[in-house]
Amino acid sequence: MPRLLLALVVALPAAAAPVPGRVDAPGWVGGAACARCHAVETKARQGSHHDRAMETPTPETVEGRFDGASFTKDGVTSTFSRHEGAYMVRTDGPDGALHDYPVAWTFGVEPLQQYLVAMPGGRLQALGIAWDARPKEAGGQRWFHLYPDEHIDHRDELHWTAAQQNWNFTCAECHSTNLVKGYAAATDAFTTTWTDANVACEACHGPGAAHVAWAEQRAGGSEAKAAGGDAPAAAPSPAAAPASPPPTGTPRYGLSVALRDDATWTFAPGAAIAHRSAPPSPVQLETCGRCHVRGAQLWPDDAPGTPLAQTHRVSLLDPGLYHADGQIDGEVYEYGSFVQSRMHAAGVQCSDCHDPHSARLRAPGNVLCARCHAAPTFDVPAHHHHAPGSPGAQCVSCHMPEKLYMVVDGRRDHSLRVPRPDLTAAIGTPNACTACHGDRPATWAAAQVAAWRGPQKPAPWHWGEAIHAGRTNAAGALDLLLRAANDRGVPAIARATAVGLLGGQRGGPRLGPALMQASRDADPLVRRAAAEAAPMVLAPPERVALAGPLLRDPMRSVRFEALGSVLDVPAAQRTGIAAADLDRVIAEYRASQTYNADRAESWFNLGQLDARLGDAAAAEKALGTAIRRAPAWAAPYVQLADLQRGSGREAAAEPLRRAIAAAPGSAEAQAAARPRARAPEARPRRAPALRRAAELAPDEPRHAWVYAIALHDGGDPKAAIEVLRRAQARHPNVPDLLATLAQYSAETGDRAGALAWARRLADLTGDPAARRMVEMLERRP
């Protein structure tokens, strides 16, 4: 089933709806009630990033200059001022004209502060111009744009009035407490509510009414100090659907799970690294992870500590998000990095390093690390190989390199890895050494590290080599991916990524058993990846055997992927799958998409679901809604055209014409719009659209491959070969390109070229058919 996307344009409604605001909700008491007993925790939280996640604009909360200051970008001059006590910004609106907008909320505080504007339909939109809250000497105290290198106007998906910048969907879940999105599809409007506008106590501890009742009963009705305040209260009943697995933990004090961790870290005699006194509960990490994870929300949060795989589709180590070795690349926050780390494997919890109430580190600099890593062993030149007190001697410089996001926000990689400049030389991933020593090559850094390690301790194999091979379809990729997928010493998120990449391999008999084993893994990320890869490499009977049991998986994200894996299998071949299981997950998937019906992507997903179920009318209706919500997105038009073409209607061409008009830069639309007739006289008419698709998406080799086939079928094999050569130079390990080059070269009489391409294909894939082609060409005079 297609995953939810995150960045598309929707039209703003003309009619206004209630502005988001606070409500009193059953079971929720609000942070003020907690403060009556928990003074120490409340004082620590005051002024923290959680406390200041959202605030009403006042002289005390607004950091930016609203004194007539202006900022110009892309031909638009925005002005920030005060008027009758309100904080105002004059900037371009959804129509491209300048308008005056009052600031409804401040958003964040440091190192930057954004501002939210109330728009029609109950929407809060985040301005693209933000205030740099850093000191002036650090380059701050200025207005700046979050996308400085991109030209953005009111039609762009990144414009502040567009869906990508909508607070209700994109931000609210993690910046407010007891957030109820309150979207109504019938009116395309929100009535979003919260208990606290910021990240208050119950955001982590859960609704507190039962805990307050326990404290009052224990104190005989007085407001005596309640013990702990360290775990969430019982959550309200979840929405109608298969129940979530209950959070683990010890219920106490009117609370349903325990967040406080009473384990200790102690050094055994002579040990340099401390060890945990008791195994950790997963509740704390899963609670923090709800807001510190990159992924799509599938379901309203059931309760703090609920496994993320139940409520979110956690992103794997995908290109653009993570480098092949798992280092951060895109804006992925901390969860996906931390679960790769040795610290996580050893039982380290978020609160071991971060005070959960102040959100500050528990100790400064290397002192924090020395709580578990003995300073005489690790905070010395013999370990870090830098002058004491220098930047290079700081643990985080090597083990938690920093990257800027949102222009000024430096965030550290939480995978806490050992620098591997040898991987930079081998697969192109970054490393902390040459990030500082920018004038030196990675080979120099690799040699230095190898000398420090000594010949008796060579650098170990790293699973990043497998991920890189799978991404680039390099020779031996299958063996490397299988090694990573089957190695229990590899972090689960990396094993899941390797399993997902198996879907792009030609592995013959080894793939089925590997994916079946992955489908039974203890980690839901691995099981989900197995279900996702299955349709690409397994025949229907094997796919049903793998995905059928996963329809009953305890985790919702796995069930959804299993649904997508079996729906394309003809009903007659779904042997062993209970209709009740299938119907239940279909209903649950619909509920998930309905929850996110403010997004065009969800309507697209519903259209695909109904098309697979054979309900063409419902599919067309859903796709039509997706088009209305995101008129510049090509995918719904293309899907609608395929649906109409499948039913034999001539109207299929109209959605494609609209797609090209709405999204002229979409390769998908250009490729889909090619004439479908296959008669010889029609073939030349297919080439221009396919050529345009290949030009628009040079990083998608399939477009060039299809264009080359059209040229060949149109009677120009030499032009086809040239297109394939250029594509192969850019994508050297794509089997289809190599196989077609070998075939077309042989047809044009270039035996030597055909043999060279066939040999490369055989070496790359080990495909018996490729080896037979090599043998045939070698025998041919």
Image: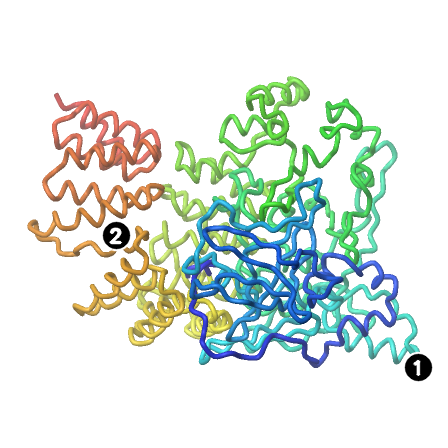
The earlier-in-sequence mark between 1 and 2 is 1
Which residue is drawn at the image coordinates 30% and 54% (left, top)?
A: 664
Q: Position of residue 493 (x, y in %)?
A: 56, 48
The disc labelled 1 sits on which kind of residue?
Gly
Which residue is drawn at the image coordinates 28% and 27% (left, top)?
A: 759
**740 left or right of 716?**
right
Give the number of the disc on residue 251.
Answer: none
How many marks are shown on the rendered structure? 2
State the image quarter where residue 654 is shown: bottom left
Q: Are marks 1 and 2 in contact (CB under 8 Å)?
A: no
Which residue is drawn at the image coordinates 56% and 52% (left, top)?
A: 71
Query: Considering only vertical position in the picture, is 485 above or below 163?
Result: above
State the image quarter where residue 408 is shown: top right
State the image quarter where residue 13 is shown: bottom left
Q: Which residue is mark 1?
A: 220
Q: CA distance from mark 1 to mark 2?
A: 73 Å
The disc labelled 2 sits on which kind of residue?
Ala
Which residue is drawn at the image coordinates 48% and 55% (left, top)?
A: 76
Q: Secondary structure at mark 2?
A: helix
Q: Secondary structure at mark 1?
A: loop
Query: Considering only vertical position in the picture, is 276 above or below 424?
Result: below
Give the number of the disc on residue 671.
Answer: 2
